[in-house]
Image (cartoon, rainbow, N blue to C red):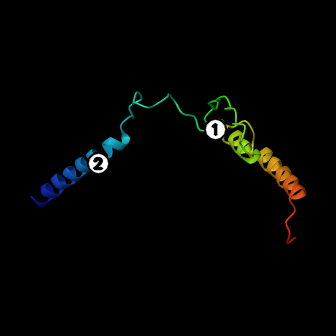
Amino acid sequence: MNTLVVVVWVLIAMHLVALAFAPILSPRETDRPGDEGTRVDPCLGPVLSLPPRREPVPAAPAEASPDAVLQELLFSGAISRTDYRAAMARLAAQDEREHPAPFA
């Protein structure tokens, strides 16, 4: 009799665990409002053999600073991190020449 009770409780526990994981393991809805389609992470695109989604780089406003323009180019994927760092180093050197620090 004790074995039967243990088996019943184990089956109930397994059923509860299956119910708990069902929402996690079920496929996601693909047509949710606000979804623009499949999103591809630019870092994982090559790994998953999917091309990163390219969007046109928006034009910067006339009053935008050079570092803001570089930041937008970096975020849009138009330039790499290495190119961004090199351009920021050039901007910093130019700024140092134009406006030297008084305490340096």
Residue situated in front as seen by the camera: 50 or 78: 78
Circle 2 packing at 10 Å, graded few (<14), some (14-19), many (20+), is few
Residue at 19% across, 51% down: 12
The image shows residue 41 at horizontal and vertical percentages of: 59, 38
Residue that numbered label 2 is attached to: 20
Report how many numbered discs are placed on residues in the image. 2
Q: Is residue 98 left or right of residue 5?
A: right
Q: CA distance from mark 2 to mark 1?
A: 33 Å
Residue situated in front as seen by the camera: 17 or 95: 95
The image shows residue 17 at horizontal and vertical percentages of: 28, 50
Residue at 37% across, 41% down: 25
Residue at 17% across, 55% down: 9
Instruction: Residue lying at the far right in this picture: please name it.
Output: 97
Kind of residue at badge 2: Ala
Query: Please, what secondary structure does the residue beneath circle 1 have?
Result: loop
The image shows residue 65 at horizontal and vertical percentages of: 74, 45
Circle 1 packing at 10 Å, graded few (<14), some (14-19), many (20+), is some
Q: Quadrant of the C terminus?
A: bottom right
The circle on residue 58 is none
Q: Are marks 2 and 1 in contact (CB under 8 Å)?
A: no
Q: Quadrant of the N terminus?
A: bottom left
Query: Please, what secondary structure does the residue beneath circle 2 have?
Result: helix
Q: Is residue 4 left or right of residue 42?
A: left
Q: Is residue 19 left or right of residue 82?
A: left
Residue at 63% across, 35% down: 45
Residue that numbered label 1 is attached to: 42
Kind of residue at badge 1: Pro
The image shows residue 81 at horizontal and vertical percentages of: 74, 46
Q: Is residue 73 left or right of residue 97?
A: left
Would you identify the image quadrant in which residue 42 lies? top right
Tell me the mark number nearer the camera, choosing from 2 and 1: 1
